[in-house]
Amino acid sequence: MITVHHLNNSRSQRILWALEELGLPYDIKRYQRDAKTNLAPPELKAIHPLGKSPVIEDGSRVLIESAAIIDYLIRRHGNGQLQPDPATDAYDSYVQWLHFAEGSAMLPLMLNLYVGRLGEAGAPLHPRIESELANYLGYLNDVLGRTPYLVGDELSGADIQMSFIGEVAQAQGKLQAYPNLAAWVKKLQARPAYRKAVERGGEYAFAK
């Protein structure tokens, strides 16, 4: 049985969604953020030294990092679901999106969140942050204007991994100028497996 060490309002929600899409049985061990610091509780360090979420246990394996976990679940347990054929060009695009989420797109969203808390002290950084957000969100919007999902006509692990980007951008009020991206987020959130994952993991309450 796969165990998901699930932190509220975190990237681990998309791991639950991937498991629901794959129809895999799993257990959830829940953790709550500290009400004052918003940090993960120290109990997570008993599972992995970094004390972060998501973390999964599958037998003797303990895995961290959302993209690595999604890749692992699909590769080890997916029976060909949620990814293109590894021999195709589409698979290369799929791997690109798995890495793009945290390697590129998440940084300006995080900077926007943290710098926004600095008030006037952070004002000089906002033009550069907004420029990077426009670059990445515009790119996503253009891609999703040509194809219903990130890798063609079918949902893949790439969409699940990238969904967090769209949802955080939505929470920060950044999607008005990107209708294709906004429609994609709405479509993902309407999927039965997505809704089931939210029921089991708890509603998001993203910081704005």
Image (cartoon, rainbow, N blue to C red):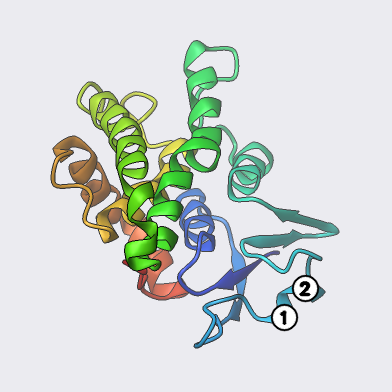
- Quarter of the image containing the C terminus? bottom left
Q: Position of residue 87 (x, y in %)?
A: 59, 12
Q: Position of residue 199 (x, y in %)?
A: 38, 73
Determine the image quadrant of residue 50.
bottom right
- Residue denoted by label 1: 42
Q: Is residue 82 visible?
A: no
Q: Nearer the viewer, residue 75 or 120?
A: 120
Q: Secondary structure at mark 2?
A: helix
Q: Nearer the viewer, residue 61 or 45?
A: 45
Residue 45 got which mark? 2
Determine the image quadrant of residue 64.
bottom right
Three-letter amino acid code at disc 2?
Lys
Three-letter amino acid code at disc 1?
Pro
Q: Position of residue 134 (x, y in %)?
A: 28, 35
- Quarter of the image containing the N terminus? bottom right
Relative horizontal placement of residue 138, taking residue 71 as reference (left or right)? left
Q: Secondary structure at mark 1?
A: helix
Q: Residue at x 32, y 30 (%)?
A: 135
Whether label 2 touches label 1, CB < 8 Å: yes
Determine the image quadrant of residue 115.
bottom left
Q: Residue furthest right?
A: 60
Report, in whole angstroms, how far the alpha carbon at label 2 lies from the one at label 1: 6 Å
Q: Residue furthest bottom?
A: 35
- Give neighbour class at mark 1: few <14, some 14-19, many 20+ (Cα, 10 Å): some
Q: Residue at x 45, y 74 (%)?
A: 200
